Amino acid sequence: MPQLEAIPAIDFQTETYKDAYSRINAIVIEGEQEAHDNYLTLAQMLADKKEELIGLSKMENRHMKGFQACGRNLKVTPDMVFAKEFFSELHGNFQKASAEGKVVTCLLIQSLIIECFAIAAYNIYIPVADDFARKITEGVVKEEYTHLNFGEVWLEAHFEESKAELEAANRQNLPIIWRLLNKVADDAQVLGMEKDALIEDFMIAYGEALENIGFNNRDIMRMSAQGLVA
Ligand code: Y39
Ligand code: Y39
Ligand code: FE
Ligand code: FE
Ligand code: FE
Protein backbone atom coordinates (compact mmCIF):
# COMPACT_ATOMS: atom_id res chain seq x y z
CA MET A 1 0.00 0.00 0.00
CA PRO A 2 2.57 2.60 -1.12
CA GLN A 3 0.18 5.53 -0.75
CA LEU A 4 -0.26 4.88 2.97
CA GLU A 5 3.46 5.29 3.58
CA ALA A 6 5.11 8.65 4.27
CA ILE A 7 4.80 10.75 1.11
CA PRO A 8 7.94 12.62 0.06
CA ALA A 9 7.48 16.32 -0.66
CA ILE A 10 6.73 16.97 -4.34
CA ASP A 11 8.08 20.01 -6.18
CA PHE A 12 5.13 21.12 -8.33
CA GLN A 13 7.24 23.53 -10.38
CA THR A 14 9.87 21.22 -11.91
CA GLU A 15 9.75 20.83 -15.69
CA THR A 16 9.28 17.09 -15.20
CA TYR A 17 6.21 17.60 -13.02
CA LYS A 18 4.70 20.25 -15.28
CA ASP A 19 5.29 18.15 -18.41
CA ALA A 20 3.44 15.16 -16.89
CA TYR A 21 0.75 17.50 -15.55
CA SER A 22 0.15 18.93 -19.03
CA ARG A 23 -1.14 15.52 -20.13
CA ILE A 24 -2.95 14.34 -16.98
CA ASN A 25 -4.63 17.73 -16.53
CA ALA A 26 -5.72 17.67 -20.19
CA ILE A 27 -7.14 14.15 -19.82
CA VAL A 28 -9.20 15.24 -16.86
CA ILE A 29 -10.43 18.42 -18.60
CA GLU A 30 -11.34 16.51 -21.77
CA GLY A 31 -12.92 13.71 -19.69
CA GLU A 32 -15.11 16.21 -17.83
CA GLN A 33 -16.11 17.89 -21.13
CA GLU A 34 -17.08 14.54 -22.68
CA ALA A 35 -18.90 13.51 -19.48
CA HIS A 36 -20.90 16.76 -19.74
CA ASP A 37 -21.81 15.94 -23.35
CA ASN A 38 -22.60 12.30 -22.51
CA TYR A 39 -25.08 13.24 -19.76
CA LEU A 40 -26.82 15.66 -22.13
CA THR A 41 -27.10 12.81 -24.65
CA LEU A 42 -28.47 10.52 -21.93
CA ALA A 43 -31.00 13.24 -20.99
CA GLN A 44 -32.38 12.93 -24.52
CA MET A 45 -32.47 9.14 -24.33
CA LEU A 46 -34.14 8.87 -20.89
CA ALA A 47 -37.00 11.35 -21.05
CA ASP A 48 -38.28 10.56 -17.53
CA LYS A 49 -34.81 11.31 -16.06
CA LYS A 50 -34.20 14.40 -18.18
CA GLU A 51 -33.97 17.01 -15.41
CA GLU A 52 -31.73 14.85 -13.21
CA LEU A 53 -29.38 14.11 -16.11
CA ILE A 54 -29.16 17.77 -17.11
CA GLY A 55 -28.20 18.43 -13.48
CA LEU A 56 -25.38 15.87 -13.71
CA SER A 57 -24.13 17.43 -16.96
CA LYS A 58 -23.95 20.84 -15.25
CA MET A 59 -21.82 19.33 -12.48
CA GLU A 60 -19.43 17.94 -15.11
CA ASN A 61 -19.10 21.39 -16.65
CA ARG A 62 -18.15 22.82 -13.24
CA HIS A 63 -15.62 20.01 -12.77
CA MET A 64 -14.02 20.91 -16.08
CA LYS A 65 -13.69 24.56 -15.06
CA GLY A 66 -12.22 23.55 -11.70
CA PHE A 67 -9.52 21.44 -13.35
CA GLN A 68 -8.76 24.19 -15.89
CA ALA A 69 -8.09 26.43 -12.88
CA CYS A 70 -5.73 23.76 -11.43
CA GLY A 71 -3.63 23.88 -14.61
CA ARG A 72 -3.55 27.69 -14.65
CA ASN A 73 -2.55 27.72 -10.97
CA LEU A 74 0.55 25.62 -11.81
CA LYS A 75 1.18 27.62 -15.04
CA VAL A 76 0.71 24.47 -17.11
CA THR A 77 -0.82 24.43 -20.60
CA PRO A 78 -2.96 21.29 -20.96
CA ASP A 79 -2.19 19.17 -24.04
CA MET A 80 -5.74 18.94 -25.35
CA VAL A 81 -4.72 17.27 -28.64
CA PHE A 82 -3.23 14.40 -26.65
CA ALA A 83 -6.34 14.17 -24.46
CA LYS A 84 -8.82 14.05 -27.36
CA GLU A 85 -6.87 11.22 -28.94
CA PHE A 86 -6.63 9.50 -25.53
CA PHE A 87 -10.42 9.26 -25.17
CA SER A 88 -11.30 8.85 -28.85
CA GLU A 89 -11.97 5.10 -28.85
CA LEU A 90 -14.15 5.17 -25.72
CA HIS A 91 -15.90 8.32 -26.95
CA GLY A 92 -16.55 6.65 -30.31
CA ASN A 93 -18.10 3.64 -28.59
CA PHE A 94 -20.41 5.90 -26.56
CA GLN A 95 -21.49 7.81 -29.65
CA LYS A 96 -22.11 4.64 -31.64
CA ALA A 97 -24.20 3.20 -28.79
CA SER A 98 -26.23 6.40 -28.42
CA ALA A 99 -26.89 6.51 -32.18
CA GLU A 100 -28.24 2.94 -31.89
CA GLY A 101 -30.39 3.85 -28.87
CA LYS A 102 -28.41 1.48 -26.60
CA VAL A 103 -28.96 3.26 -23.31
CA VAL A 104 -27.60 0.34 -21.25
CA THR A 105 -24.26 0.49 -23.09
CA CYS A 106 -24.15 4.29 -22.72
CA LEU A 107 -24.75 4.01 -18.97
CA LEU A 108 -22.10 1.30 -18.60
CA ILE A 109 -19.51 3.40 -20.45
CA GLN A 110 -20.19 6.76 -18.76
CA SER A 111 -21.82 6.09 -15.38
CA LEU A 112 -19.94 2.92 -14.45
CA ILE A 113 -16.59 2.65 -16.26
CA ILE A 114 -15.70 6.33 -16.69
CA GLU A 115 -17.03 7.36 -13.27
CA CYS A 116 -15.05 4.55 -11.58
CA PHE A 117 -11.97 5.65 -13.54
CA ALA A 118 -12.53 9.19 -12.21
CA ILE A 119 -13.20 8.02 -8.64
CA ALA A 120 -10.01 5.92 -8.57
CA ALA A 121 -7.87 8.64 -10.14
CA TYR A 122 -9.20 11.48 -7.96
CA ASN A 123 -8.96 9.54 -4.68
CA ILE A 124 -5.36 8.58 -5.47
CA TYR A 125 -4.51 12.14 -6.57
CA ILE A 126 -5.91 13.95 -3.49
CA PRO A 127 -3.11 13.02 -1.02
CA VAL A 128 -0.36 14.01 -3.50
CA ALA A 129 -1.99 17.10 -5.03
CA ASP A 130 -0.95 20.72 -4.50
CA ASP A 131 -3.17 22.54 -1.98
CA PHE A 132 -5.21 24.34 -4.64
CA ALA A 133 -5.90 21.19 -6.69
CA ARG A 134 -6.60 19.12 -3.58
CA LYS A 135 -9.50 21.34 -2.52
CA ILE A 136 -10.98 21.30 -6.02
CA THR A 137 -10.60 17.53 -6.39
CA GLU A 138 -12.14 16.81 -2.98
CA GLY A 139 -15.28 18.68 -4.05
CA VAL A 140 -15.37 16.98 -7.44
CA VAL A 141 -14.96 13.38 -6.27
CA LYS A 142 -18.01 13.62 -3.98
CA GLU A 143 -20.13 14.43 -7.03
CA GLU A 144 -18.63 11.57 -9.06
CA TYR A 145 -20.17 9.16 -6.52
CA THR A 146 -23.55 10.75 -7.30
CA HIS A 147 -23.00 10.08 -11.02
CA LEU A 148 -21.99 6.47 -10.37
CA ASN A 149 -25.07 6.07 -8.18
CA PHE A 150 -27.35 7.29 -10.98
CA GLY A 151 -26.11 4.50 -13.24
CA GLU A 152 -26.32 1.88 -10.48
CA VAL A 153 -29.91 2.76 -9.55
CA TRP A 154 -31.17 2.80 -13.14
CA LEU A 155 -29.41 -0.43 -14.11
CA GLU A 156 -30.51 -2.21 -10.92
CA ALA A 157 -34.13 -1.32 -11.72
CA HIS A 158 -33.71 -2.74 -15.26
CA PHE A 159 -31.28 -5.54 -14.39
CA GLU A 160 -32.84 -8.61 -15.98
CA GLU A 161 -33.43 -7.05 -19.39
CA SER A 162 -30.03 -5.24 -19.31
CA LYS A 163 -27.81 -8.12 -18.25
CA ALA A 164 -26.77 -9.40 -21.67
CA GLU A 165 -26.07 -5.91 -23.04
CA LEU A 166 -24.07 -5.02 -19.91
CA GLU A 167 -21.88 -8.09 -20.33
CA ALA A 168 -21.23 -7.32 -24.00
CA ALA A 169 -20.50 -3.65 -23.28
CA ASN A 170 -18.17 -4.62 -20.43
CA ARG A 171 -16.28 -7.00 -22.71
CA GLN A 172 -15.89 -4.28 -25.31
CA ASN A 173 -14.97 -1.37 -23.04
CA LEU A 174 -13.12 -2.64 -19.95
CA PRO A 175 -9.99 -3.55 -21.99
CA ILE A 176 -9.95 0.04 -23.29
CA ILE A 177 -9.74 1.44 -19.73
CA TRP A 178 -6.92 -0.98 -19.02
CA ARG A 179 -5.01 0.32 -22.09
CA LEU A 180 -5.73 3.94 -21.13
CA LEU A 181 -4.34 3.35 -17.65
CA ASN A 182 -1.17 1.89 -19.16
CA LYS A 183 -0.82 4.96 -21.42
CA VAL A 184 -0.85 7.37 -18.45
CA ALA A 185 0.88 5.26 -15.80
CA ASP A 186 4.30 6.90 -16.26
CA ASP A 187 2.87 10.43 -16.09
CA ALA A 188 0.72 9.48 -13.08
CA GLN A 189 3.84 8.15 -11.33
CA VAL A 190 5.54 11.54 -11.77
CA LEU A 191 2.55 13.09 -9.97
CA GLY A 192 2.98 10.59 -7.12
CA MET A 193 0.12 8.30 -8.17
CA GLU A 194 0.93 4.58 -8.05
CA LYS A 195 -0.39 2.39 -10.86
CA ASP A 196 -1.16 -0.50 -8.49
CA ALA A 197 -3.19 1.79 -6.24
CA LEU A 198 -5.15 3.08 -9.27
CA ILE A 199 -5.98 -0.46 -10.41
CA GLU A 200 -6.96 -1.49 -6.89
CA ASP A 201 -9.29 1.48 -6.36
CA PHE A 202 -10.81 1.08 -9.82
CA MET A 203 -11.51 -2.62 -9.38
CA ILE A 204 -13.03 -2.07 -5.92
CA ALA A 205 -15.35 0.69 -7.16
CA TYR A 206 -16.32 -1.15 -10.35
CA GLY A 207 -16.84 -4.48 -8.58
CA GLU A 208 -19.06 -2.79 -5.97
CA ALA A 209 -21.05 -1.11 -8.73
CA LEU A 210 -21.66 -4.44 -10.50
CA GLU A 211 -22.72 -5.96 -7.17
CA ASN A 212 -25.14 -3.10 -6.45
CA ILE A 213 -26.73 -3.57 -9.87
CA GLY A 214 -27.37 -7.27 -9.20
CA PHE A 215 -24.45 -9.31 -10.52
CA ASN A 216 -23.24 -12.18 -8.31
CA ASN A 217 -19.62 -12.71 -7.29
CA ARG A 218 -19.00 -15.20 -10.04
CA ASP A 219 -20.29 -12.76 -12.70
CA ILE A 220 -18.12 -9.99 -11.22
CA MET A 221 -14.97 -12.13 -11.32
CA ARG A 222 -15.67 -13.14 -14.91
CA MET A 223 -16.45 -9.58 -16.05
CA SER A 224 -13.36 -8.16 -14.30
CA ALA A 225 -11.11 -10.76 -15.93
CA GLN A 226 -12.37 -9.61 -19.32
CA GLY A 227 -10.48 -6.35 -18.72
CA LEU A 228 -7.22 -8.27 -19.01
CA VAL A 229 -7.75 -9.10 -22.68
CA ALA A 230 -5.65 -6.16 -23.81
O1 Y39 B 1 -17.48 11.61 -14.90
C1 Y39 B 1 -16.44 12.23 -14.93
O2 Y39 B 1 -16.36 13.32 -14.42
C2 Y39 B 1 -15.31 11.63 -15.65
C3 Y39 B 1 -14.87 12.36 -16.78
C4 Y39 B 1 -13.97 12.16 -15.67
C5 Y39 B 1 -12.90 11.19 -15.94
C6 Y39 B 1 -11.58 11.75 -15.78
C7 Y39 B 1 -10.60 10.66 -16.05
C8 Y39 B 1 -9.47 10.78 -15.14
C9 Y39 B 1 -8.36 9.89 -15.54
C10 Y39 B 1 -7.07 10.41 -15.07
C11 Y39 B 1 -6.02 9.35 -15.16
C12 Y39 B 1 -4.97 9.61 -14.17
C13 Y39 B 1 -4.17 8.42 -13.88
O1 Y39 C 1 -5.16 -6.45 -13.84
C1 Y39 C 1 -6.33 -6.24 -13.64
O2 Y39 C 1 -6.80 -6.23 -12.51
C2 Y39 C 1 -7.21 -6.01 -14.82
C3 Y39 C 1 -8.45 -6.66 -14.90
C4 Y39 C 1 -8.38 -5.26 -14.78
C5 Y39 C 1 -8.71 -4.40 -15.91
C6 Y39 C 1 -9.38 -3.16 -15.44
C7 Y39 C 1 -8.62 -1.96 -15.76
C8 Y39 C 1 -8.31 -1.13 -14.56
C9 Y39 C 1 -8.18 0.28 -14.94
C10 Y39 C 1 -7.81 1.15 -13.79
C11 Y39 C 1 -8.06 2.57 -14.04
C12 Y39 C 1 -7.59 3.41 -12.89
C13 Y39 C 1 -7.85 4.86 -12.98
FE1 FE D 1 -1.74 -0.44 -1.91
FE1 FE E 1 -16.85 14.91 -13.28
FE1 FE F 1 -18.89 12.30 -13.39
Image (tube, rainbow, N blue to C red):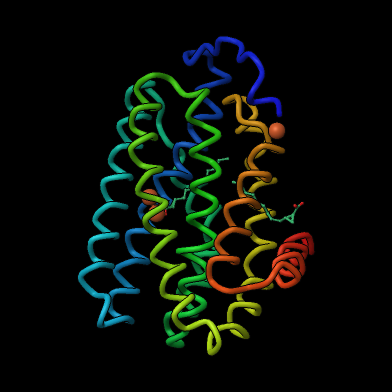
Q: Looking at the image, which residue sits at the far left?
A: 51
Note whether 178 is above or below 46 in the view shown: above
- Residue 211, picture quadrant: bottom right
Q: Position of residue 84 (x, y in %)?
A: 48, 53
Which quadrant is the N terminus positioned in? top right
Note whether 96 is above or below 190 in the view shown: below
Note whether 101 is above or below 57 in the view shown: below
Q: Position of residue 179 (x, y in %)?
A: 69, 54
- Residue 69, picture quadrant: top left
Number of callouts in the render? 0
Residue at x-position 55% and y-position 13%: 10
Residue at x-position 37% and y-position 22%: 75
Note whether 7 is above or below 119 in the view shown: above
Left of 87 or right of it: where is 225? right
Which quadrant is the C terminus positioned in? bottom right
Left of 192 or right of it: where is 51? left
Q: Position of residue 172 (x, y in %)?
A: 66, 72
- The one of 27 and 195 positioned closer to us in this rendering: 195
Left of 202 or right of it: where is 36? left
- The one of 73 and 216 positioned closer to us in this rendering: 216
Q: Position of residue 102 (x, y in %)?
A: 47, 84
- The one of 136 and 86 positioned closer to us in this rendering: 136
- The one of 43 and 152 positioned closer to us in this rendering: 152
Residue at x-position 45% and y-position 41%: 26
Residue at x-position 55% and y-position 34%: 124
